[in-house]
Image (tube, rainbow, N blue to C red):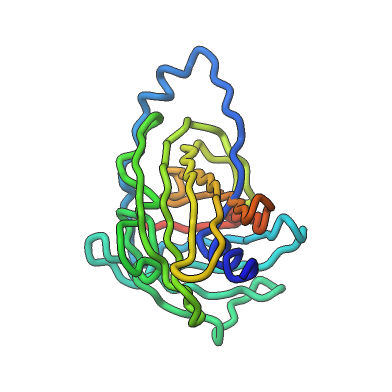
Amino acid sequence: MRHSIAKGAAAVAACWGLTFCAGPALAQATAEVAAKPPVKIGDRWVYQRHDLLKDKLIEKAEFAVAAVAGDAVDLRRTLLGADGKPEAAKAETFRFDWGRGIRTSVVESGDYRYFDFPLQAGKQWSYKYRRPSGGGGPSTDFDAKVEVKAWQDVTVPAGKFRSLLVRHSGEFKPTSGAGTGIYQMDVWYAPQARRIVKEEFQGYVEGQISVKFRTELVEYQLGP
């Protein structure tokens, strides 16, 4: 049971938050607003994901925009090999809700909002949704509160970005069987990259940490 719940937590994504210290520029930074970014066919981002509990790189993948119809965006995800080259046999195209920042197939019911544009420090929202297991097991219910914390300068392999820290805090529970967990997910959104540049997630089951991941932007290319 612990394994199935941990797997449910891992499906969401990323870890604990960093403390933000602000000086005299806090009022100005708080007033900054990040609007919903534009998106164009050909835009692409490459991310790498680490399992922090195992200190291991577990995935590197490219996400490229294949089609756009309003907020409905088709993203092609291609896993990259150790040499950085695409592995064509490990590619898939899926529908992505650009406004909410989510892959639509992860929502069985409810309203999952990874983002709620426009973003501004101090903004809050909440969500409840049910996520299918994808492996034949029970679905998982998520209930969380989200707060846009502050602007920060974040450095990742793709460079240094002025980013908004968005923190998700909530709980998850399988629709059948015992076991409830809690999680915290910190997401850094950078207008310059038009997507997240970093995500950290940690989940706890029965009071013990079960998953801890970090995802970072490695490179990106955007249309004019």
Between residues 140 and 60, which one lies in front from this camera angle? 140
Quadrant of the image occupied by residue 6: bottom right
Q: Is residue 88 left or right of residue 65?
A: right
Which residue is painted at 35% across and 54% down in the image? 128
Where residue 84 appears, as percent x and y from the top left, is 66, 71
User: Residue farthest to the bottom?
Assistant: 89
Quarter of the picture containing the N terminus is bottom right
Where residue 17 appears, as percent x and y from the top left, is 59, 39
Where residue 13 appears, as percent x and y from the top left, is 54, 58
Q: How many marks?
A: 0
Q: Is residue 18 left or right of residue 220?
A: right
Q: Is residue 192 above or below residue 137?
A: above
Which residue is painted at 31% across and 65% down in the image? 109
User: Residue farthest to the top?
Assistant: 24
Which residue is painted at 51% across and 57% down in the image? 220
Q: Is residue 43 left or right of residue 86?
A: left
User: Residue farthest to the front?
Assistant: 178
Quarter of the picture containing the C terminus is bottom left
Which residue is painted at 49% across and 38% down in the image? 165
Where residue 218 appears, as percent x and y from the top left, is 60, 56
User: Residue farthest to the right?
Assistant: 55
